[in-house]
Image: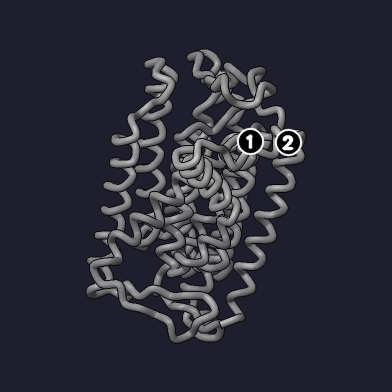
Amino acid sequence: MIADLLYKLSEHWGLFNVFKYITFRAALAVITSLIISLALGSLLIRRLQQFQIGQHIREEGPKSHQSKAGTPTMGGILIIISIVISVLLWGDWSNKFLWIVTISLIGFALIGGLDDYIKIVKKRNKGLSAKMKFGSQIILSGAIGTVLYLISQNDGFNTVLHFPFFKTLTPELGLLFIPFVIIVIAGSSNAVNLTDGLDGLAVGSVMIAAAAYAVFAYAAGNAVVSDYLNIAFVKGVGEITVFMSALLGACIGFLWFNCHPAQVFMGDVGSLSLGGVIGTIAVLCKQEILLVIVGGIFVMEALSVIIQVFSYKTTGKRVFKMAPLHHHFELSGWSESKVVVRFWILAILFALVSLTTLKLR
């Protein structure tokens, strides 16, 4: 909004011409969301404490976590507010993809917020029923997939699936694109939710994935760059770089309060929305398959739960000491900080590997 107004001043003062550049507005988005999250963080934490919105810690988890009981949760609201305000200021709201990703963020935040509300205020430890929670995620993901499918019929977007390392492997999904989008977005949302179990682990990993997808979005939205790198060109998707930059800044600010020992947890309102957004961005810039690499930490965490449940139901034995995977390492003797930092290192490696695929095609 403000970026558009400032750009119009370029007719009189050439200096304001910089506001047409995505990279300049992306930099402003990082700074703005970071400042907002740092400025509002302490205030939000006090309000959450006043309303007694504290985290319940499951008894079967690591005993060291019992001391965290009562820590304010639903701090993901801080991330949502910071992103939305920053994008409102520096985003180009004539861009359809910016609307889609913002609706995705708010939609998944509402689902997560309702889940948190039921767990904390209504004192129902499991929150939303699995049917309601997954059903809501499927409906929202399906709606996004449907909108994108309709756009693909006449407006530059397509439903072709692109595989890294394989130039000619580009199957046309057609109507199958919609269920595929549901799997990608809902799966990403739940994977990040499973990762959110240690101080700073989920938000740090999301930051790294967001930085990688900011690069992918910019490359996919630039005709010259996408042609040089031989990746799918999606007209207009470069604007999503501004959104991802705002997300990056908001997460850095939140990490200030969420690092060990955490003053606040993000709750499902944060983890479900951030995961949903990462999945949505992957679909928009046509890098869905790469999400398995970019979000390698989230994949590891989700797979550990699937393997644990399958093994226990079929053999009665557990593969891991506890799932998700970060708890296994805690129970193996690693300190919480060691688990988090080492998982961050892995997340950085996954992101770097994914970026190398830009040239290996």
Residue beneath label 2, please?
A: 332
Task: Residue at 49%, 29% (x, y): give it.
Answer: 74
Q: Is residue 253 visible?
A: no
In this picture, residue 184 sits left or right of residue 16: left
Query: Label 1 is placed on what type of residue?
Result: Lys
Residue sitting nearer the eye, 108 or 236: 108
| Position of residue 141 measured from the top left corner of the image (x, y, whole percent) | 32, 51
Q: Is residue 272 above or below residue 282?
A: above
Q: How many marks?
A: 2
Question: In which quadrant of the rendered view does residue 233 lie?
Answer: bottom left
Q: Is residue 216 visible?
A: yes
Does the residue at mark 2 contact the one at mark 1 (Cβ under 8 Å)? yes
Residue sitting nearer the eye, 29 or 20: 29
In this picture, residue 94 sits left or right of residue 27: left
Residue sitting nearer the eye, 187 or 100: 187
Tell me which numbered mark, 2 or 1, is placed earlier along the sequence: 1
- Mark-to-mark CA distance, 2 and 1: 8 Å
Q: Quadrant of the C terminus?
A: bottom right
| Position of residue 113 measured from the top left corner of the image (x, y, whole percent) | 40, 31
Q: Is residue 142 above or below residue 339?
A: below
* Residue 215 tag number: none
Q: Is residue 352 above or below residue 123?
A: below
Query: Label 2 is placed on what type of residue?
Result: Ser
| Position of residue 190 measured from the top left corner of the image (x, y, whole percent) | 45, 44
Mark 2 surroundings: few (<14), some (14-19) or many (≥20) residues within 10 A: few
| Position of residue 207 measured from the top left corner of the image (x, y, whole percent) | 60, 50
Q: What SS does tag 1 mark?
A: loop
Q: Is residue 83 above or below residue 25?
A: above
Residue beneath label 1, please?
A: 321
Question: In which quadrant of the rendered view does residue 195 lie?
Answer: top right
Task: Residue at 33%, 41% (x, y): give it.
Answer: 134
